[in-house]
Image (cartoon, helix red, strand yellow):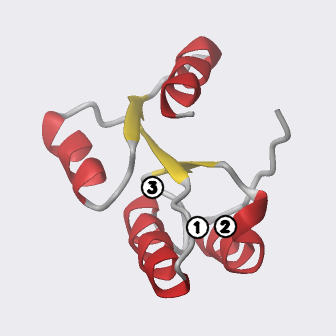
Amino acid sequence: LEVEVANNGQEAWQRIQHHHDHYDILLTDLRMPVLDGIELTKKVRSFEQEQHLNPLTIIGLSAHALKSIKDKCLDVGMNNFISKPVEADLVLKAVQEET
C-alpha cells in the first residue's frame, strides 16, 4: 500500500481535486480541522458527479460508535465506517471488503 497523510480535511480536498485518479481509497476522520469528514465526503461525491469520475471508496473513522453517526456517514456517501480505536487488521479488512 502507498499511503499519503493530509493534515486536515481541506488539504485532503485539495489533493483529491488535483489527483483524484491517483487514489483508490480515502480514510477520513469525522472530526478533522478546517473541513470535517462528512463535509469532505459531500464535496468529493459532488466533484465526482460533476467530473464524471469513478467514485473513490471512502471509509469514515470516528470515536463515536453510535448507529446514528454510522448512518449519517453512509447517507452522505461513505462506503463504510470504522469506530476508533482503529486496529490495523480492521482497516485492512474494510479495505479488502470495498475493493
Q: Looking at this view, is 83 or 93 the one in front?
A: 93
Q: Looking at this view, is 9 or 15 the one in front?
A: 15
Mark toward the start of the polypeptide (2 vs 3): 2
Q: Residues within 10 Å of mark 3 (few under 14, many from 20)?
A: some
Q: Which mark is residue 48?
A: none
Query: Which type of secondary structure does the marked residue at label 2 adopt?
Result: helix
| Nearer mark to the viewer, of 1 and 3 | 1
Identify the residue at image location x=44%, y=79%. Answer: 49
Query: Which type of secondary structure does the marked residue at label 1 adopt?
Result: helix
Q: Quadrant of residue 12?
A: bottom right
Identify the residue at image location x=38%, y=51%. Answer: 78
Q: Which mark is residue 9?
A: 1
Looking at the image, residue 99 lies above or below residue 43: above
Q: Quadrant of residue 39?
A: bottom left
Q: Looking at this view, is 9 or 53 the one in front?
A: 53
- The Cα–Cα distance between marks 2 and 1, rounded to whole angstroms, is 5 Å
The type of residue carrying mark 3 is Arg
> Do tag 1 and tag 3 residues touch (Cβ < 8 Å)?
no
Mark toward the start of the polypeptide (1 vs 3): 1
Looking at the image, residue 98 lies above or below residue 48: above
Left/right of residue 6 with respect to residue 40 in the rendered view: right
Q: Quadrant of the C terminus?
A: top right
Where does the image place residue 17, in percent across and percent down from the top left? 67, 79
Left/right of residue 46 with respect to residue 88 in the rendered view: left
Looking at the image, residue 99 lies above or below residue 51: above
Where does the image place residue 28, in percent across and percent down from the top left? 53, 50
- Residue denoted by label 3: 31
Looking at this view, name the residue that lies furthest to the bottom.
Answer: 50
Left/right of residue 49 with respect to residue 52 in the rendered view: left
> Do tag 2 and tag 1 residues touch (Cβ < 8 Å)?
yes
